[in-house]
Image (cartoon, rainbow, N blue to C red):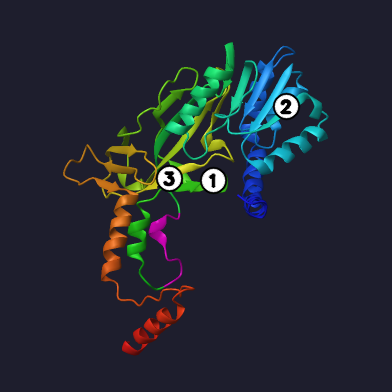
């Protein structure tokens, strides 16, 4: 990549990077709990490694807590000077080694007593994330070393969500049933400001847990299934799915209370039945996952199934039936031919 193109690429990313890390630094729940975990683990003999260091907060705190060695690894180029400036502001710039690299490619001497890593992104249980944790654990974690987080668990719960897709269009005397039926095939990410819209109708249950200290392969995310008994089935219109992170044996963070962690909401058409059992079945696969909701206590009621694949298929079918005109942009080497073709199309219509 040429220098100018590289600068343009970097410039285009900065706004999104700053916004993302502003949200994380503003997450008081996450910050307080992870800081407590650090304070319980860091001593003057600690060799500390932060993988995916972000703005450098945990590396800086480890240095201020007196860690013997502190290394911060970050792949995002625009964050490297931010880590350094923050280290300067806090008087620990000479105590932190900053490495610009993907953790899988980084070559770092020695082992570490404490490794902090939040390499989750949007694929916390995926193969790439799990392989990264296995790699950093095998290459960098000292015998009897501590890995934070230790575990990550995924929970689900039947819920009632206010202002669902069923309520659009707002204030307009038209129907949009096709869009609504398509949108139901995609989950929605609810951040902290939208959490009050979600009402739990039962106790959350664990869908899947992974222990980063012992995992050797990515877990299967096919046909994850849970059931609940509800006093009023008709009240449920969605399932909320969120993660719970175990930093230490005593310190855990519920993702539903976190500002920087999203909550996935899977909507469905409410059932008319009252009391009974409701079952949620989920398969997580990027762009092709699916989920379904059924009523085991009412076997006569057909289950509802959703997937982005279904939405895509319906769009393609409707596209063939849609009456419309299409104009292709002219190409440099055939602009006249394209313009002539477009003029003919206009005359025919």
Residues in magenta, as a range? 163-172
Whether residue 93 appears in magenta in the rendering, the answer is no
Tag count: 3
Q: Position of residue 256 (x, y in %)?
A: 52, 37
Separation of marks 1 and 2 at Cα, in angstroms: 33 Å
Tell me the residue that label 3 is attached to: 265
Tell me the residue that label 2 is attached to: 97
Residue occupying the point 75% across, 26% down: 96
- Secondary structure at badge 1 equals loop
Instruction: Specify the label residue 191 is tagged with.
Output: 1
Q: Position of residue 165 (x, y in %)?
A: 40, 57
- Secondary structure at badge 2 equals strand
**Image: 3 above or below 331:** above
**Residue 321 in sight in this render:** yes
Give the class, few, some or many, for how many residues have Cα within 10 Å of label 1's Cα (few <14, many ≥20).
Answer: some
> Mark 3 or 1 closer to N-term?
1
Residue 296 falls in image quadrant: top left
Q: Position of residue 225 (x, y in %)?
A: 31, 33
Residue occupying the point 57% across, 29% down: 105
Q: Position of residue 79 (x, y in %)?
A: 68, 40
Q: Quadrant of the C terminus?
A: bottom left
The mark lying in front, picked from 2 and 3, is 2
- Secondary structure at badge 3 equals strand
């Amino acid at each position: 990549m040429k220098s100018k193109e590289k600068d343009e690429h970097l410039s285009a990313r900065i706004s999104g990077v700053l916004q993302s890390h502003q949200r994380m630094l503003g997450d008081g729940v996450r910050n307080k709990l992870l800081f407590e975990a650090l304070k319980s683990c860091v001593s003057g003999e600690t060799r500390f490694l932060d993988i995916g260091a972000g703005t450098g907060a945990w590396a800086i705190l480890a240095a201020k807590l007196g860690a013997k060695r502190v290394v911060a690894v970050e792949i995002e180029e625009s964050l490297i000077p931010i880590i350094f400036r923050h280290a300067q502001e806090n008087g620990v710039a000479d105590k932190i080694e900053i490495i610009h690299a993907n953790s899988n490619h980084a070559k770092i001497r020695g082992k570490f007593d404490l490794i902090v890593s939040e390499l989750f992104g949007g694929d916390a249980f995926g193969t790439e994330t799990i392989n990264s944790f296995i790699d950093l654990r095998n290459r960098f974690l000292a015998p009897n070393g501590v890995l934070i987080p230790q575990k990550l668990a995924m929970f689900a719960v039947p819920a009632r969500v206010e202002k669902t897709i069923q309520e659009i269009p707002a204030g307009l005397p038209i129907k949009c049933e096709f869009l609504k039926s398509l949108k139901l095939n995609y989950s929605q990410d609810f951040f902290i400001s939208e959490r009050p819209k979600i009402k739990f109708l039962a106790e959350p249950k664990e869908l899947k847990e992974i222990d980063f200290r012992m995992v050797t392969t990515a877990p299967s995310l096919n046909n994850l299934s849970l059931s609940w008994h509800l006093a009023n089935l008709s009240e449920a219109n969605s399932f909320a799915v969120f993660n719970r992170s175990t930093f230490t044996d005593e310190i855990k963070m519920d993702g539903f209370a976190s500002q920087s962690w999203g909550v996935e909401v899977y909507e469905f058409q409410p059932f008319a039945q009252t009391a009974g059992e409701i079952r949620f079945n989920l398969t997580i696969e990027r762009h092709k996952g699916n989920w379904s909701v059924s009523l085991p206590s009412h076997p006569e009621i057909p289950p509802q199934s959703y997937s982005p694949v279904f939405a895509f298929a319906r769009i393609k079918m409707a596209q063939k039936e849609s009456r419309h005109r299409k104009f292709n942009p002219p190409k440099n080497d055939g602009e006249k031919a394209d313009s002539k073709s477009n003029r003919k199309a206009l005359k025919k219509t």
